[in-house]
Amino acid sequence: MLTRFLGSTAFAVCCLASAAAGHAASAPAYAVVDKVAGADGGWDFANVDPVRGVLYVARSNAVMAMDIATHKVTDALATADGSHQALPIESGKTVVQTDGKTGLTRFIDAATGHIDAQLPSGQKPDAAFYDAQTGKVAVMSPGSNTITTILAKSHKVVGTMTLEGGLEFAVTNGKGGAFINLEDAAKIAEVDLAKGKLLRKIELPGCEGPTGLARFAHGTRLISACANGVALVIDTASGKTLTTLPIGKDADAVLLDEARGLAFVPCGGSGTLVALSIADANNVSVAQIIPTQVGAKTGAIDPRDGRIYLPTATLAAPEPGAKRGKPLPGTFTILIVAPKA
């Protein structure tokens, strides 16, 4: 996921703009308001710790931290090797980091960068989430088709289950289990993590390569972002798709801001951030299409003020045989998106 980029097209952006036109009257006027530079290299998931006011970004060789108030960047809070997730837990005291190349999940002291524990987590550990209700971290490892469950306080592996289909992003199901996007199978799996059991698979009609996933409306709805330029809204009880919405290309996350009745889908291939109105769970719609930058495919929201942070960089032309270009030196940046004054 570190370099999962696609090219943008004027046609795609035009179509998205037309789809949002009907919602212009109520659209939140978001825009890129600032940029903060960081060290060269790839990136993947980003997360905000609202307690300490820190943005964490999983970088190819480190965990990056940015003080949100001052924009001071620590390029390497801790070193890494193919980092995918950098997730603050325990009121910001600890950062959980998945290390794609070593197969480790690390627990990092957020204040010092010290690695308190590192645990084998299958091959190519990628997305991970923390379930505060159970105190467990769940790690998706698509290289071995395994999900590793870890007790956060004791740093103890308490479960491993196998699930094929291309493990992608996952969220808690509110019952000690998880909903997981299966990128290759184009389905959502619901699992019982305690029992290591597959409960069901939810069909995603018209979706290719589901990546980003969010759960909202008291757990009754899911939004799944798909690689082919659509997002699906799913009823969790029935598993039925309620709405299919146009987004951009190469979406890799769904950022939830329920306090403001919005969700955002960063689309790296199109260089757009698609805002969805979720205030009415039965009528989710495209509210605004925000120009960002090609490559901005993941991000994080600060729940305190609704500001959005999108890591990206200028991309070179793809090399022969490669699908995506590499980030150019000296161009990595964090885009800050907020409502216009």
Image (tube, rainbow, N blue to C red):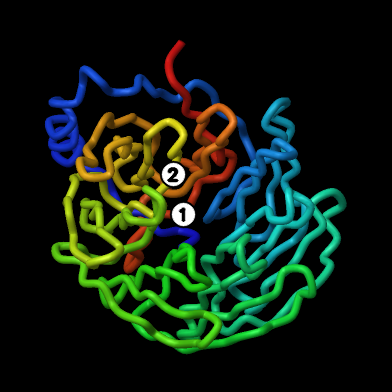
Which quarter of the picture shows residue 284?
top left
Residue at 46% across, 34% down: 259
Label 2 secondary element: strand
* Position above or below: 202 against 199: above
Q: In this view, does 96 lie to the left or right of 33?
A: right
- Asked whether the beta carbons under mark 1 and mark 2 sit within 8 Å of each other, the answer is no
Few, some or many residues within 10 Å of mark 1 (<14, 14–19, 20+): some
Q: Which amino acid does label 1 sit on?
A: Lys
Which quarter of the picture shows residue 166?
bottom left
Q: Nearer the viewer, mark 1 or mark 2?
A: 2
Residue at 56% across, 74% down: 125
Residue 44, horizontal then vertical, whole percent: 52, 56
Which numbered marker is on residue 326? Answer: 1
* Position above or below: 307 against 64: above
Residue 190, horizontal then vertical, whole percent: 38, 75
Task: Pick whichever, 338 or 194, lies toward us.
Answer: 194
Task: Pick whichever, 339 or 199, lies toward us.
Answer: 199
* Position above or below: 313 against 198: above
Residue that lies at the very extreme toward the top in this rendered image: 341
State which tag comes first along the sequence, 1 or 2.
2
Q: Is residue 323 left or right of residue 147?
A: left
What is the distance, in whole Å, between disc 1 and disc 2 at their CAs? Answer: 28 Å
Residue 268, horizontal then vertical, whole percent: 36, 46
Residue at 22% across, 38% down: 285
Task: Pick whichever, 219 or 305, lies toward us.
Answer: 219
Q: In this view, does 141 lie to the left or right of 109?
A: left
Q: Which amino acid does label 2 sit on?
A: Leu
Residue at 56% across, 49% down: 46
Few, some or many residues within 10 Å of mark 2 (<14, 14–19, 20+): many
Label 1 secondary element: loop
Tag 2 residue: 256
